[in-house]
Amino acid sequence: MEREKILVIDFGGQYNQLITRRVREKNVYAEVVPYKKALDAIKKEKPIGLIFTGGPNSVYDAKSPDIDPEILDMGLPILGICYGMQLIAKNMGGTVTKSDKREFGKTKTMVDPASKLFDGLDVEQTTWMSHVDYVKELPEGFRTVASTDSCPVAAMENREKNIYAIQFHGEVNHTENGHEIIDNFLKKVCHAKGDWNMHDFANEAKRAIQEKVGDKKVLLALSGGVDSSVCAKLLVDAIGENLICIFVDHGLMRKNEGDEVEEAFKDTGMHFIRVDAKDRFLKRLKGVTDPEQKRKIIGEEFIRVFEDEGRKIGAVDFLAQGTIYPDVIESGAGDAAVIKSHHNVGGLPAVVDFKDLIEPLRDLFKDEVRQLGEAIGLDPKLVWRQPFPGPGLAIRVMGEITEEKLDILRDADYIFRDEIAKAGMDHDINQYFAVLTNNRSVGVMGDFRTYDYTLALRAVTTSDFMTADWARIPYEVLDKVSVRIVNEVEHINRIVYDITSKPPATIEWE
Ligand SMILES: Nc1ncnc2c1ncn2[C@@H]1O[C@H](COP(=O)(O)OP(=O)(O)OP(=O)(O)O)[C@@H](O)[C@H]1O
Ligand SMILES: O=c1[nH]c(=O)c2[nH+]cn([C@@H]3O[C@H](COP(=O)(O)O)[C@@H](O)[C@H]3O)c2[nH]1
Ligand SMILES: NC(=O)CC[C@H](N)C(=O)O
Ligand SMILES: [Mg+2]
């Protein structure tokens, strides 16, 4: 049976993957397609509808991304968002112009509930806008179905042609009823049944893996974290004994973590290898202080370890990794800016043993990965672990990495995690850890002067790790953590709590 699918046509917007995710949340499968490949993809995939994304350009610039006009005549339901709406207007005979003021942020919007898009909603809505260009004249056959004080056409529709468009971003949470609007498009315009779920995703991912791998061997980079553990389960279900899991103990793990990971996979029947690579990682990181340089060295060294292990096994064609969407986007995929280079993104180095990468989770957000883990029956302890970055404590020791600093950080971090668990907050806070800053300050202990490190505590709440808020940990808990750490861990005499959200900060400090 053909699965219902929505294609999200990418014009370079920041929220494209978020759009696909909103669609998947409504139990309709969706995937992003670059605009240049849209026509081919439509013919091949036979979607039930299209969504055109936003984008940074202006439609009237000659060099801007455009749509193949044939697509607008195929009779497929279309939802244009922002740039996507402007493209529809331009291509169908309307006009788009630059406004003299930018409309940005939450905006009062009057909608017409008689439009299928706004069915069931009140006339007055809050939407989230981010644009300077706007549709000045409607294309023929369209009518206005929403407006704001400064934007006469905040949404338009052509019922006969099943083409709908919104100037605001319905995919972001700041648009009060964005979920309903997208759901209306799916159910009332595309007539989606909405019967897709993570079990289907798992089955298709397994089938794709089997097809790609055949009877060859796959080496999985397994950290014991959520993403690679979900990958391990998916792969072992798909290819059984042809899967070999390599856990690299790079000496940058948290206290006791290496043993815990080994314990978790020991009796699963999977082929599991723990590699002690501490010396080679620390040697390469010696004297390195720049965060991006640390990340690049670690990413490269990981691959070299996998290669060495692959050679020992012989004839391993594929390297699998638990790369997920936020890793990809923050490392600067497509036209997005590089925030930080995640160690596992950027593809394989030019000279490498492996023929290809297998990354079945590349399109998913963290919480979707967890849903998938639950759907395929992964141990809940693994599904609900807090994430831990591949470069490990290397990016939590500011400045140069030494064994002494790593040990200080491990002990302090352990106490912080222990107290959070004792306070029963380990499920409410999505990620929490300590950072050893490169700052020293003067203190007094037992009548003596100390001149020691400042430790920072970081704790955040988030569902997708793309944005995050700092966790409101009660003072009493922070107090306990602080007293314990300065008493139990030598060389820390001052503790600060990080109260920045993401953005503008990131979760990790480097
Ligand atoms: N110590 C390690 N040994 C082997 N592979 C690793 C290690 N650390 C990271 N990786 C690889 O890099 C990928 C990305 O790391 P990342 O930390 O984002 O994911 P994870 O560890 O699987 O899950 P989580 O985000 O929950 O920690 C992992 O999925 C895994 O394939
Ligand atoms: O595997 C990883 N390799 C990396 O290089 C990396 N950098 C950040 N992280 C994790 O990603 C999430 C978002 O982190 P940031 O807000 O610091 O970018 C948080 O969960 C971070 O712990 C990484 N994970
Ligand atoms: N976010 C967008 O898609 C912006 C579209 C267009 N560049 C504008 O400013 O109106
Ligand atoms: Mg990890």
Image: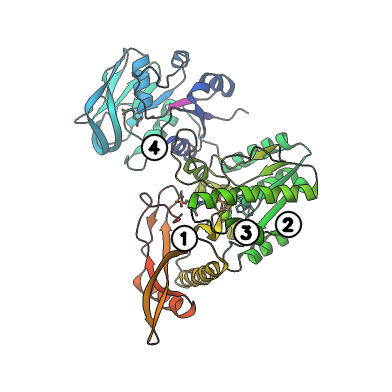
Disc ID at residue 171 = 4
Q: Residues within 10 Å of mark 2 (few under 14, many from 20)?
A: some
Q: What's the amino acid at mark 4?
A: Glu
Q: Are discs 2 and 3 less than 8 Å apart at CB?
A: no
On the image, the x and y values in percent for residue 469 come to 37, 55
Q: Which residue is mark 1?
A: 398
Q: What's the amino acid at mark 2?
A: Ile
Name the image quarter holding the N terminus.
top right
Disc ID at residue 273 = 2
Nearer-the-camera pick, 263 or 20: 263
Question: Depth-wise, is mark 3 or mark 1 nearer the camera?
Answer: 3
* Some atom of ligand 1 lies within 8 Å of the CB belonging to the residue at label 2: no
Q: What is the distance, in whole Å, between disc 4 and disc 3 at their CAs?
A: 46 Å
Q: Circle 1 sits in a helix, a strand or a loop, which is it?
A: loop
**In the shown orientation, is residue 79 left or right of residue 392?**
left
- From what the image shows, is residue 7 above or below residue 286? above
**In the shown orientation, is residue 152 left or right of residue 217?**
left
Question: Depth-wise, is mark 2 or mark 1 nearer the camera?
Answer: 1
Q: Residue at x 46, y 25 (%)?
A: 50
Magenta segment range?
47-53
Q: Residue at x 45, y 55 (%)?
A: 508
Mark 2 vs mark 4: which is more N-terminal? Answer: 4
Disc ID at residue 283 = 3
Disc ID at residue 333 = none
